[in-house]
Amino acid sequence: AVPRLSRDTYFCRPSVERLREVSETERAAVHNFQVGRHGFGSIVWSGFTDVRDLDLDQLVDIGRRYVSVAVSVAEGCEKQYARRLNKPATLLLDMRSENSTRGEGSACLVEILREQCTLQQASFLSYDEDSDVLTVRVDHFSRYGFLDESDDEQNPSAVDS
């Protein structure tokens, strides 16, 4: 069956519409499957991913400077489906904040982001100053968050699944 993704600001590549058109066998091995949220970021799973029957509305949460994938949900079949997403991926996160100014302290920000990657066992790939996009590589999933020091929230860290 086709994965479910009905939230307005979210998208996947290939699209749910395209996945409806392909065979069950093709849905069982989607190359570099991507789920994203406009204005926040996206996740690209490396290699081939079995997307059959995934409820992406329940499993994937992309917010301001964080991504979360529920890989240990309720027991039974749903848990087995969720585990399909617990694999290496690339995260692209929009790091803009409501009160940030482009280029302001970017060297310091990059250092903070590198440190937060290390603390969360993620690999810093790049930070594009012009687009304010952070690109990170992760080996598994739970929650990854990246905040600068001016945020009031505590720095979240990854929790092993």
Image (cartoon, rainbow, N blue to C red):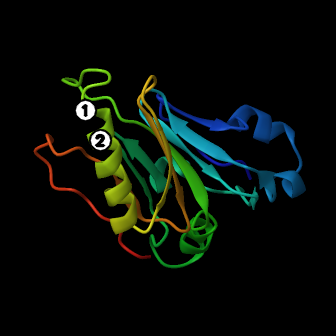
Give the residue displayed 73% in from the left and 32% down from the top. Answer: 17
Q: Position of residue 21 (x, y in %)?
A: 85, 37
Q: Quadrant of residue 76?
A: bottom right
Left or right? Give the position of 79 relative to 95: right
Please tell me whether residue 108 is drawn above or below residue 85 in the rendered image.
Answer: above
Q: Position of residue 150 (x, y in %)?
A: 14, 40
Q: Badge 1 is on which residue? A: 105
Say whether residue 15 is visible. yes
Quarter of the picture holding the C terminus: bottom left
Which amino acid lies under the numbered mark 2 shown in the image of this protein?
Leu
Q: Looking at the picture, tell me which residue is in the foreground, 53 or 32.
A: 32
Left or right? Give the position of 103 relative to 150: right
Give the number of the disc on residue 109.
Answer: 2
Give the residue displayed 67% in from the left and 57% down from the top. Answer: 53
Please tell me whether residue 12 is drawn above or below residue 71 in the rendered image.
Answer: above
| Disc 1 + disc 2, Cβ < 8 Å | yes
Which amino acid lies under the numbered mark 1 shown in the image of this protein?
Gly
Please tell me whether residue 126 is drawn above or below residue 128 in the rendered image.
Answer: below
Tell me the element at label 2.
Answer: helix
Left or right? Give the position of 42 relative to 50: left
Residue at far left of view: 152
Q: Looking at the picture, tell me which residue is in the foreground, 62 or 151.
A: 151
Tell me the element at label 1.
Answer: loop
Give the residue displayed 64% in from the left and 67% down from the top. Answer: 84
**Measured Cα–Cα span from mark 1 to mark 2:** 6 Å
Q: Position of residue 105 (x, y in %)?
A: 25, 32
Give the residue displayed 42% in from the left and 44% down from the top. Answer: 62
